[in-house]
Image: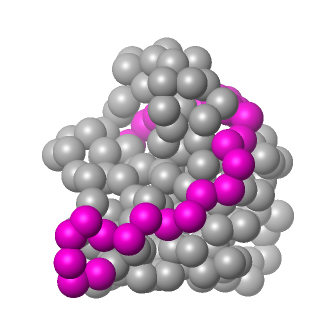
Amino acid sequence: MLAVILCILPHKSEATVVEFQTVMGNFEVNLYDNTTPTTVANFLDYVNNGAYTSSIMPRFVPDFIVQGGGFSFNLIWPAPVISSNAAITNEPEFSNLRGTIAMAKTSLPDSATNQWFFNLGDNSANLDLQNAGFTVFGEVVG
């Protein structure tokens, strides 16, 4: 498990950049505000409400994904679930390439809420087509 704290960074560009502060180090993610506005607004709502503060990344599949956004850190298992808002509309505009962040969802195309994942490899052949595609809404930049 990996604990996560997120904050929005001021940036000179038009895009929103968030910093992931983890026990493994910090990194920045550039969000695709203009192309996936519903998804970015949804993600930032959770960030601004502190939902991801002390959250964990409980799912890791080597060379595939690392997933977070659904659970908070706690010394007992199962970890507390992060409350979710209403599901959002799927916006699959970009490929699920290495270093991108995308929304997790159920088998329904428009079911993403608070969980997201980082693509650890080129998952475009699978995730761009599966279940009407998975919405990529940003990429790691630093």
For image coordinates 42% across by 82% down, the residue present is 54
Which is nearer the eye, 108 or 6? 108
Q: Is residue 142 left or right of residue 108?
A: left
Question: For residue 8, which quarter of the picture?
Answer: bottom right
Relative to residue 74, is residue 96 depicted above or below? above
Relative to residue 54, is residue 104 depicted above or below? above
In the rendered image, the quadrant that contains the N terminus is bottom left
For image coordinates 72% across by 67% down, the residue present is 45
Which is nearer the eye, 106 or 62? 106
**Magenta region, residue range:** 74-98
Which is nearer the eye, 88 or 35? 88
Q: Is residue 119 left or right of residue 103?
A: left
**Residue 85: percent from left, percent from top:** 68, 56
Which is nearer the eye, 25 or 46? 46
**Residue 72: percent from left, percent from top:** 40, 74
Question: For residue 83, which quarter of the picture?
Answer: bottom right
User: Residue 26: in sight, yes or no?
Assistant: no
Q: Is residue 90 left or right of residue 22?
A: right
For image coordinates 57% across by 74% down, the residue present is 51
For image coordinates 70% across by 66% down, the residue present is 44
User: Residue 42: in sight, yes or no?
Assistant: yes
Q: Is 80 contained in the magenta span? A: yes
Q: Is 120 contained in the magenta span? A: no
How many labels were placed on the picture?
0
Q: Main secondary structure of the magenta part?
A: loop
